[in-house]
Amino acid sequence: MGNKKVTESYLDMMEESLKEKIRVLEDIMKENEAQKEILESDVSFDEAGFDEAISRKGELIRRVENLNDGFESLYERVREELQNNKEKYKQKINTFQDLIRQITDLSSSIEAGEKRNRALAKSYFSSSKEQINTHRRSSQAALDYYLTMNKSKITPPQFYDTKN
């Protein structure tokens, strides 16, 4: 690559990209927590809040993908220079390794949170489905009773004298 200033600039951009990825992953963890709170809430299910958290998380995941692509693109430009001059860039490489460790830890925490939320959602929705089915059965029984009672009113009572 030759030009030291260009290499340094790319390395700085790569470091900033990794730091930004950490910030975005931390935001994803916050969205996971928001989803967890909604799923564990004893009050009524906040469908709008849940959908918003999913939407925000989707946007954050797209940002992570863009950061990954940008990092890869920059790395391709400086890879040879880094591999040929490891001692020269040792401090920057150590910084990258530390940031990547943080990213790996955050990614593991996010994955665990996703699994937990998936289990909570499955439990919540299966419980809701059961409640809906129970409610439907109760409603059907009430409707059957109502229809039966209405039919009995159509039939004139047998003990009334209708002759007047």
Image (tube, rainbow, N blue to C red):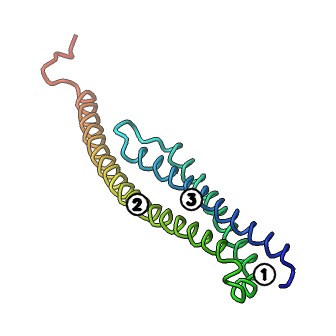
Query: Mark 3: which secondary structure?
Result: helix
Q: Do the residues labelled 2 and 3 touch (CB within 8 Å)?
A: no
Q: Position of residue 125 (x, y in %)?
A: 37, 53
Spatial CA span between label 2 and label 3 = 18 Å
For mark 2, what is the residue? 118
Q: Is residue 25 above or below residue 83?
A: above
- The residue that appears at 16% across and 15% down in the rendered structure is 161
Q: Which amino acid type is shown beneath numbered disc 1?
A: Arg
Q: Are marks 3 and 1 in contact (CB under 8 Å)?
A: no
Quadrant of the image for the C terminus? top left
Q: Do the residues labelled 2 and 1 touch (CB within 8 Å)?
A: no
Q: How crowded is mark 1: few (under 14 residues within 10 Å), some or many (20 or more)?
A: some
Q: Residues within 10 Å of mark 3 (few under 14, many from 20)?
A: many
Residues 152 and 117: in front is 117
Tag 1 or tag 2, which sits nearer the N-term?
1
Please state if 152 lies on the left or on the right of 96 as rendered: left
Label number found at residue 25: 3
Q: Is residue 21 above or below residue 5?
A: above
Q: Kindly indicate the quadrant of the structure image that contains residue 114.
A: bottom left
Q: Kindly indicate the quadrant of the structure image that contains residue 141.
A: top left
Spatial CA span between label 3 and label 1 = 25 Å
Please state which of the two labelled residues, at mark 2 or mark 1, is closer to the viewer: 1
Tag 3 or tag 2, which sits nearer the N-term?
3
For mark 1, what is the residue? 77
Spatial CA span between label 2 and label 1 = 39 Å
Tag 1 or tag 3, which sits nearer the N-term?
3
Please state if 86 lies on the left or on the right of 32 as rendered: right
- The residue that appears at 67% across and 61% down in the rendered structure is 63
Query: Mark 1: which secondary structure?
Result: helix
Q: Which amino acid type is shown beneath numbered disc 3?
A: Leu
